[in-house]
Image (cartoon, rainbow, N blue to C red):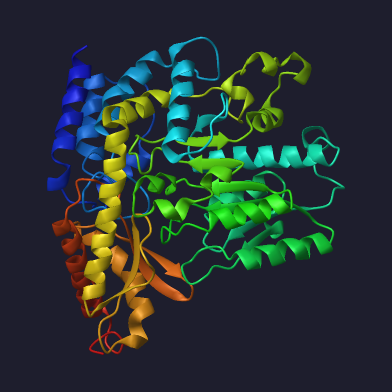
Amino acid sequence: MDELHVAAELTAEYLSRVDGRPVWRPVPGVDAEWLAGQDLPESGRPLADLLADIRDRMLPYPMGNGHPRFFGWVNSAPSPAGVLVEPLAAALNPSCAGGDHAGVLLERAVVRWLAGLVGYPHRPGGGLLTSGASLATVTCLAAARQRAARADGWDVRTDGLAGRPPFTGYVSAEGHGCLRRAAELLGIGSAWVRTIPVDDRFRMSAPELRSAIEADLSAGARPLFVAANAGTVNTGAVDPLDELAGIAAEHGLWFHVDGAYGALGVLAPSAAPEFMGLELADSLALDPHKWLGVPVDCGCALFADPSCARDAFSLVPAYLRDEESGELGWFAEYGPEQTRPFRALRTWATMSHLGRAGIVRLVTRTTELARTLAAMISEERDFELLTPVVTSIVAFRYRPLGRPHELDELNRAIPAVVRQGGRAFLTGTRLGEAEALRACVLNPSTTEKDLAGLLGEIRLAARRFRSAAPPGHPTKGS
C-alpha cells in the first residue's frame, strides 16, 4: 500500500527536523476552525488526502514535547523504537484483556521488567499496564479499599459504602490531583482525603501524618491509605518513603507510592538514596510514557500482593480462581478495563532498544542536566533556586534586582510569553505562596546550550512583558 510508505516518510521527515522547528506555535484561526469544526464527510475520502491534511494542518502544530528545548510539565519526546512499532500494534489490533496470544504474554514480561528496574518486589500477576498513572491510581486504591473492607468483615463491591465509617486517605500538599480524583471516583470523597503539610524540601511531613491518622482514629473514621510521592511534578521531591511506610504499617494502612514521573529516578546514583522504602509499598504507580519516552499512552500499576487487585476487580467467582496452581487469570481481572490495547509492544520495543544500561544512562543524563541548570540559576543574580534538585525537575524564580513588588505577576506571566516566542517551552507552578517557574528535563538530546538558551528566553520574555504593560501599570518603567 503506497500510503503506508508516505506515512512512514512523513513520520521520518517530521522526527528528523523537530529541533529545527519552533518548539510550539499557536494554531492560526483558519486551521483551528478546520480542525475543530469540520463535518463528517458524506462519502469516504482517499487515504492520500488524509495524509495531506495531517502534513499541512496537524504536523505544523505539535504540543512541542519532542523538542530539546521543551521543559514543560512531564511530557517526554517519543522513543524511536516506540514510534517504529506502533503501526504494527495497530495492524495486529489485539484486545489484551487476556487469552493466549503474544500481546498478553509480552505484557507479563514488560511489567516484570518495570518492577525490576525500580527494585520493586514482583510476584507473577503483580501488575498491569494502564492508560496512565491516573487509572493506575484508581486501580491501586480500589485494591486498598477492597482489602480494608474485607478486613473489617464486609464486601464493598456488594454492599457499597453506605452506613460504614468514612474511609480516610492521606496525601502530601504536593501530591498529584489524580490521588484526590481517585478517592472521589471510589466513593471515598475528597473531603476525607487529608492534605499533609510538607517540610522545607517539599516532602510530606511524617510527624504531621502521624498526627492526622491519630486524630481520625479518635474521631471514629477508618484510615485507609497513605499516598507518598517518589518524585513530585512540582519539584521532583521524594517523600521520606521508609518513614512513611513504617507509619502506614503501624496503623494497618495501605501504603501507595506515586512514582508516575519519578520512580525511575532511583536509577540515578545521585538520587538513589532518596528512594529508600520504595520497595515497601503495597502498590506503586509509574508511567513508562514519562521518563522512558514510551509513546502515549502507557502507565503501570504494580502490587505487592496481586490477589488484592484481583479481589477488587475480577468477575470470576473466587471459588473458580485457581491461584494456588499459578493460574493468573486475565488482565481484565486486575483492573477496570475490559478491552485493552497493545501497550506492551511500544514499551517492550523502547526498553529492549535501550537496554538496562541505556535506561540508566537516560535517567542519569537528564538528572545531571537538571543539576547543571540548577547550578546555572544559582550563579545568576537575577534568578533564584527554590528547592534542591532531586530528580530532573528544577523549580526556580526569575528575580530581577529592585523589583520585589512585581515578582509574582512577572513569574506568572513569563511561561506564556516564552512559549509564544517558539524557542523554548516552559511552565509555571506555585510553591507555597510564591509563583514559580519549573523546568522538567526528560529529553536526552537537550544540551547545556539549550539550558542557557532557556534562561535567555526567560529574560527576553520578562522584557517583553514589561514593555507590553499599559501606562501606569506597576511593571511599566518600575
Horizontal arrangement in the rendering, residue 320 relative to residue 265 (left or right): right
Say above or below: 287 vs 391. Answer: above
The quadrant the N terminus occupies is top left
Residue at 25 percent of width and 44 percent of height:
66
Q: Is residue 334 above or below residue 262?
A: above
Q: In the depicted view, which residue is nearer to us: 7 or 159?
A: 159
- Residue drawn at the location 61% of the way across and 52% of the way down: 245
The quarter of the picture where residue 106 lies is: top left
Nearest to the observer: residue 385 or residue 83: 385
Residue at 17% from the left image edge and 63% from the top image edge: 452
Numbered marks: total: 0
Residue 381 position within the rendered picture, expressed as x and y whole percent measured from the top left: 22, 80
Q: Is residue 396 left or right of residue 14?
A: right
Rendering quarter of residue 31: top left
> Which residue is outermost to the top?
100
Residue placed at 26% from the left, 52% from the top?
A: 70
- Give the camera-side residue of 163 and 232: 232
Residue 235 visible in the displayed image: yes
Q: Where is residue 477 drawn, in percent x and y?
A: 22, 89
**Does residue 418 appear in the picture of this structure?**
no
Residue 377's place in the image compared with 123, above or below, is: below
Answer left or right for 375 relative to 122. Answer: left
Q: Is residue 140 left or right of residue 65?
A: right
Q: What quarter of the picture does the C terminus occupy?
A: bottom left
Q: Position of residue 325 (x, y in %)?
A: 66, 13
Image coordinates for residue 140, horizontal then vertical, percent = 61, 39
